[in-house]
């Protein structure tokens, strides 16, 4: 219905230099992008956040908005029903997910060789169930793993990453319960886990032989979660029935659970209801605790979608109210080269 809205607005919930760490954001300035602004411009503002990953923070970047407002375009790039392939040939149009991965590889290339590695998982949350898109074959069959056990694959290049995500996206589109050709009926969550390895300082006083036996390796894992949320919908407006109505109900419930979690963190409640939905449970590490969250709100400028736009802005307002004392960063191990 609301597909193809070239005039839609993308609103980022923070200024580039002051990302709203879940733990210490207070009314940070907004940045508003028109649809005419390039993916380059958007990503230039997003990129500085990624350095936090190597500083020991978990990071989450999510796109929120009504159906057809540009979430998938913002996170992945242009997609058509027939071709979901992410190609580096479409580089100017590529969205945040491929660009962020490339940037993480670039940051890691500046570190001592072998000191960092990246594993990827690609899942969709559909009707409050987690579908592991890397654990299925090309026909979409599951290889006997439980849905809650997520496959992770080590990747060494952006190209390999894009191949994996493409594979996942094709399964997402072919999922038999996805009834809307142009609409994502599931939340897509791409997780990059970055492991940092370093050798403790006392190892270097030893001879090589002792080094073998006394070497104390410390591994620290940080997570980047990149999320293309399913579209928030007012049922009356979309007029869905049957299976689609059930999907919409699950989508709206999980988005509302996400909003509740942000509200609970904002109010510094002792209990944060992460377990109320699979989506919030999956994102727990990157929206709470030592985490920095960036929300891209995708908003239609059409008057007829005013209710949806206000609803999205309400979500953004809640995300901006999140604050929780001082953010704690993990102490990363000191690398051998810096000693
Ligand atoms: N900034 C933009 N520039 C050019 N085209 C855009 C832009 N934003 C969105 N579009 C186009 O608008 C259409 C709808 O966008 P998209 O599929 O990203 O919406 P969505 O919010 O992910 O929808 P859904 O929730 O239904 O999956 C697509 O054809 C997309 O390529």
Image: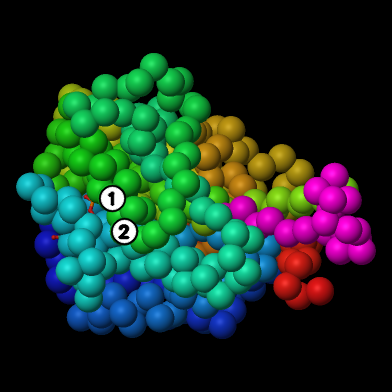
Vertical relation: 157 (above or below) 138 = below
Say left or right for 230 vs 244: right
Q: Quadrant of residue 2?
A: bottom left
Q: Which residue does the image show at 54% across and 68% down from the upper left?
A: 108
Image mark for residue 159: 2
**Where is residue 68 shown, x and y percent of the image?**
20, 56
Badge 1: how crowded within 10 Å, few (<14), some, or many (20+)? some
Side of 68 where 268 appears, left or right: right
Which corner quadrant of the image does residue 179 belong to? top left
Residue 254 in view of the camera: yes
* Residue at numbered disc 1: 163
Kindly tell me whether residue 216 is visible in this rendering.
Answer: no
Tell me if residue 196 is in the magenta stretch.
Answer: yes
Image side of residue 75 versus residue 223, left or right: left
Residue located at (36% from left, 68% from top): 99
Evaluate if marks 2 and 1 touch, with contact meaning CB atoms under 8 Å apart: yes
Magenta extent: 194-213
């Amino acid at each position: 219905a609301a597909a193809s809205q070239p005039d839609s607005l993308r609103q980022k919930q923070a200024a580039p230099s002051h990302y709203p760490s879940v733990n210490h954001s207070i009314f940070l300035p907004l940045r508003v992008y028109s649809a005419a602004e390039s993916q380059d411009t958007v990503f230039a503002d997003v990129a500085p956040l990624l350095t936090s990953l190597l500083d020991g923070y978990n990071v989450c970047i999510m796109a929120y908005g009504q159906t057809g407002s540009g979430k998938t375009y913002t996170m992945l790039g242009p997609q058509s029903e027939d071709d979901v392939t992410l190609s580096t040939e479409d580089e100017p149009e590529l969205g945040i997910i491929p660009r962020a991965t490339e940037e993480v590889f670039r940051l890691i290339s500046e570190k001592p060789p072998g000191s960092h590695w990246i594993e990827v998982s690609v899942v969709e949350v559909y009707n409050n169930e987690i579908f592991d898109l890397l654990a299925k074959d090309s026909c979409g069959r599951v290889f006997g793993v439980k849905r809650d056990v997520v496959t992770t694959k080590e990747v060494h290049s952006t190209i390999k990453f894009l191949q994996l995500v493409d594979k996942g996206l094709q399964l997402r589109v072919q999922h038999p319960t996805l009834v809307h050709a142009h609409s994502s009926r599931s939340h897509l969550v791409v997780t990059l886990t970055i492991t940092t390895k370093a050798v403790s300082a006392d190892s270097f006083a030893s001879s090589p032989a002792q080094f073998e036996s006394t070497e104390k390796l410390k591994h620290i894992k940080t997570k980047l979660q990149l999320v293309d949320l399913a579209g928030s919908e007012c049922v009356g407006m979309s007029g869905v029935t049957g299976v689609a109505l059930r999907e919409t109900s699950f989508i709206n419930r999980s988005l509302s659970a996400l909003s509740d979690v942000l509200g609970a963190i904002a109010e510094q409640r002792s209990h944060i209801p992460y377990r109320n939905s699979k989506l919030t449970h999956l994102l727990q590490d990157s929206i709470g605790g030592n985490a920095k969250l960036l929300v891209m709100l995708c908003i239609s400028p059409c008057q007829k979608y005013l209710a949806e736009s206000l609803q999205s802005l309400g979500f953004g307002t809640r995300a901006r109210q999140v604050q929780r004392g001082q953010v704690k960063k993990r102490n990363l191990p000191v690398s051998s080269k810096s000693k």
